[in-house]
């Protein structure tokens, strides 16, 4: 899932990373402890989960993003057009 953006941390200390073409990402320097991991990508619903990071440890995880529903397509409504009466308009 390329071009997804990964956010780690709360609003004040949030960092972001762009996912590579194969959908893999590596993040270094994340503080130990429970952090919020949020993944966003255009056309998909944002995914958010809590992750317990351990300093220096490598963690593998798999996330699946759900496509957002496309906006509904409304049928065109046709209205009859009445012809104008009187032809052309002449000014005073």
Image: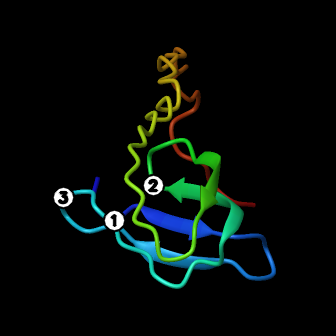
Left or right: residue 70 versus residue 9 is left
- Quadrant that contains the C terminus: bottom right
- What distance separates the C-alpha of mark 2 from that of mark 1? 9 Å
Q: Residue at x 52, y 21 (%)?
A: 74
Query: Relative to the observer, which residue lies in front, 38 or 55?
Result: 55
Q: Are dots 3 and 1 in contact, CB under 8 Å?
A: no
For discs 3 and 1, the disc positioned in front in the rendered view: 3
| Residue wearing tag 3 | 22
Describe the element under mark 2 as helix, strand or loop.
loop
Q: Picture quarter containing residue 23?
A: bottom left
* Residue pictured at 64% horizontal, 46% vertical: 49
The mark nearer the N terminus, 3 or 1, is 1
Residue ID at (74%, 82%): 13
Gap between marks 3 and 1 measured at Cα: 10 Å
Q: In this view, does 4 lie above or below 16?
A: above
Quick one: label 1, few (<14), some, or many (20+) residues within 10 Å?
Answer: some
Q: Is mark 3 on a helix, strand or loop?
A: loop
Identify the element where label 1 is drawn: loop
Badge 3, how many Cα within 10 Å: few under 14, some, many 20+? few
Q: Position of residue 43 (x, y in %)?
A: 44, 46
Which residue is at 51% across, 36% downward?
87
Q: Nearer the viewer, mark 3 or mark 2?
A: 3
Q: How crowded is mark 2: few (under 14 residues within 10 Å), some or many (20 or more)?
A: few
Task: Identify the mark at residue 42; answer none if there is no mark.
Answer: 2
User: Which mark sits nearer the N-terminus, 3 or 2?
Assistant: 3
Compared across the picture, whether 35 is left or right of 67 comes to right
Image position, residue 61 (x, y; %): 41, 48
Q: Which of 18 and 84 is in front in this view?
A: 18
- Residue beneath disc 1: 3
Asked whether the residues under the numbered discs 2 and 1 touch, taking CB atoms below 8 Å apart as contact, a structural biologist would say yes
Of callouts 2 and 1, which one flags the residue occurring earlier in the amino acid sequence? 1
In the image, 15 versus 87, the foreground residue is 15
């Amino acid at each position: 899932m390329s071009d997804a953006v990964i956010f780690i941390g709360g609003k004040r200390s949030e960092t972001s990373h762009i996912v590579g073409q194969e959908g893999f990402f590596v993040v270094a320097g994340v503080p130990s402890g429970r952090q919020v991991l949020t993944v966003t990508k255009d056309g998909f619903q944002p995914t958010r989960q809590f992750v317990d990071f351990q300093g220096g440890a490598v963690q593998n995880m798999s996330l699946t993003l759900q496509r957002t529903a496309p906006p509904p397509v409304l049928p065109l409504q046709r209205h009859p057009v009445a012809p104008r009466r009187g032809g052309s308009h002449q000014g005073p």
